[in-house]
Image (spheres, grey):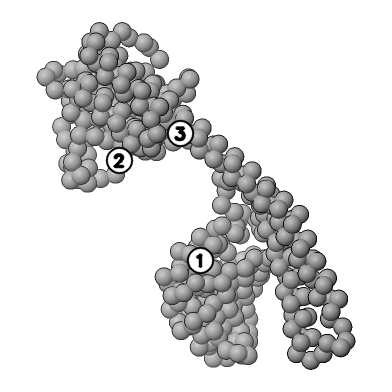
Amino acid sequence: MPHRRIHDVGRLRRLLDAILLLEADLSIPLLLRHFLQEACEMTGARFGALGVLDEQGTGLAEFLTVGMSDEEEHAIGAPPTGRGVLGILIEEPDPLRLKNIAAHPASVGFPPGHPQMRSFLGVPVGAHGKVFGNLYLTEKTGSDEFSDDDEAVVLALAQAVGLAVERARLHERVQQLAVLEDRDRIARDLHDAVIQRLFAIGLSLQGIARPPLQGEVLDRVHRAIGDLDDTIRQIRSSIFELSRTSAASPGVRASVLSLVHELRPVVGFDVAVSFDGPLEAKVPEGIIEDLLLTIRESLTNVGRHAEASRTSLRLSVDSSALELEVVDNGRGFTGASSTVTSAGGLGLANLRRRAEKRGGELVLSSPENGGTKLVWRVPV
């Protein structure tokens, strides 16, 4: 990145003040906007923009502007993605000064409602040899083009912006690593402390589940032992998932929980969700989309038609199959337990087809205590 001498002492002092803000505890959006405003004020630009590149470095993922009103931005519509003159700076990250942006061969014009712009100055934003985006200025007041001094000032500011972006991304990476370390610690604590204590409680209950205990008391003890075994199995599954799921990937469980939370207003109440088995390891990525669509349709049906006050969702996987079970206490449906053929509307027929396409099945039944039980099962 070329370096140019800044001749204006006043602008040099203001530039140093701006760069010192890197040490302030400011959020990255606030810091970037401040740098952009400083670039406009120090060069006399009427409009400024800061484009942040996507992960591939081929287009703009974010676009921050100053100088335009909310009404003007709304009239323009969607922000640019990196075509035309902006695309040149992405492909060739070198400073670019133009007296009339519309006269450039790569110009694609402006969308309807866009303010008129002629003079243009664009510089790359980067640090330590890596380019994160570009800083754009247009419409210099008091002159028909930007000067060498303007370019030098903006280049220095752009390097400061690059350092801010680099620091923010490094901080994000450190947080991700901290999350992974926390997951490892939680998994160890669950295995070494919680499961062992549950085992001890289970053994104690088994020790007293002998005569003279009988009748309802004995049944309750056996049920408690069964509940403990089920809890231990679910904790083991959670430990396995914690050790496998990365901070960047939401995983099957997180995706299901997120969808259930999203559908709460549709259902009308919280859905009890439980998991069993190594879902992240056993469920192929191709099945997840069908699974989430099935959950969405099932819970939407509960909210719209079941008149239920309680619903549970259980997702389990073993060595051969993935099974989704959705049970509600609503008004149920007419007809005995059956594999769905024509029962229900188009939504249920779609769920059946998704299951059969994967060699599985969809079964609807009415439990003895009322309501509806939906089981969607596919091989894995």
Dividing the image into 4 quarters, which one contains the N terminus?
A: top left
What label does residue 79 carry, if any?
Answer: 2
> Helix or strand or loop: what does disc 3 sit on?
helix
Q: Left or right? Give the position of 212 relative to 52.
A: right
Residue 136 visible to the viewer: yes
The amino acid type, in three-letter code, at marker 2 is: Pro
Q: Which element type, helix, strand or loop, lies under badge 2?
A: loop
The answer to whether mark 1 and mark 2 are in CB contact below 8 A is no
Q: Report the residue at 43% width, 78% height from top.
A: 304
- Which residue corresponds to mark 3? 168
225 or 157, which is in the foreground?
225
For the point 45% across and 69% down, the residue is 264
Separation of residues labelled 2 and 3 (CA atoms)? 23 Å
Residue at disc 1, secondary structure: helix
- The first of marks 2 and 3 along the sequence is 2
Q: Specify few, some or many for label 1: CA neighbours under 10 Å numbering under 14, 14-19, or 20 or more.
A: many
Q: Nearer the viewer, mark 1 or mark 3?
A: 3
User: Which label sits on residue 260?
Assistant: 1
CB under 8 Å between discs 2 and 3: no
Asked if the residues shown at circle 1 and circle 3 are in contact, with their CB atoms under 8 angstroms apart, the answer is: no
Q: Is residue 323 left or right of residue 262?
A: right
Kind of residue at disc 1: Val
Above/below status of 247 relative to 87: below
Label 3 Cα crowd, 10 Å radius (few <14 / some 14-19 / many 20+):
some
Among numbered discs 1 and 2, the one appearing first in the sequence: 2
Residue found at x 45% / y 33%? 168
